[in-house]
Structure formats: C-alpha cells, structure tokens
Image (cartoon, rainbow, N blue to C red):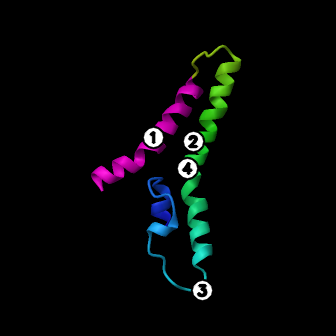
Amino acid sequence: MLFVRLLPIFPSMGQLRVRHHKYPLSDFLLATMIGMLPYDFALTNAVVEVGEAAAHGFKLSPVFIAALTLLAFVSLVPFASKIYG
C-alpha cells in the first residue's frame, strides 16, 4: 500500500486488493500519510519559493531552482519506476 501511495498514478484504494483483517482503514491511512509526504513537501516548498521569487521581482536564486528541481524529481519518480521497474 505504501508503494502505491508513493506513486500518484493510483487515485484510490478501490483499485487495490486490501487485506481483510482487523484494521484495513488504519493501514490505508498510515500508508497514505507516509506515501504522500515527499510530494506534499516538494509542492509546498516550490509554492513558497515561487512566492518569495515573486516578492523579489522573479530573481532566480539557488533555493528557487532547487525547489523546482525537487518538485520535478518527485513528480517524475513514478514514471522512472514504471520504466525501469
């Protein structure tokens, strides 16, 4: 479940077979929270840096470029894992 949540191409748990045991919802929620953290962090960081760049006349800074690079990397990992995996 955690691997699937790291790949944003799967929108919901309904596409997967989930083990039937005592706590399937808690497993899904925990995997969702952990699996979405990298993308949420990169997206939030990129938005903050775009706001900072806009406030300073859209001057490119190393932090701004790093934030956009991180967002691109996190967004492309699912495609790379699909190609090479």
Give the Cα separation between the discs numbered 3 and 1.
37 Å
Q: Residue at x 63, y 40 (%)?
A: 44
Q: Please state the horizontal and vertical placement of residue 11, each as a whole percent of the image.
A: 50, 58
* Mark drawn on residue 42: 2
Check if mark 4's residue and mark 2's residue have beta carbons within 8 Å.
Answer: yes
Q: Residue at x 57, y 70 (%)?
A: 28
According to the image, label 3 marks what residue?
A: 22
Q: Earlier in the sequence, mark 1 or mark 2?
A: 2
- The residue carrying pointer 3 sits among few (fewer than 14), some (14 to 19) or many (20 or more) residues within 10 Å by Cα, namely few
Q: Residue at x 60, y 47 (%)?
A: 40
Q: Amino acid at mark 1?
A: Phe
Q: Earlier in the sequence, mark 4 or mark 1?
A: 4
Give the Cα separation between the discs numbered 4 and 1.
10 Å
Location of the C terminus by quadrant is: bottom left
Check if mark 3's residue and mark 4's residue have beta carbons within 8 Å.
Answer: no
Image: magenta residue range:
62-85
According to the image, label 4 marks what residue?
A: 38
Q: Please state the horizontal and vertical placement of residue 64, each as a whole percent of the image.
A: 58, 27
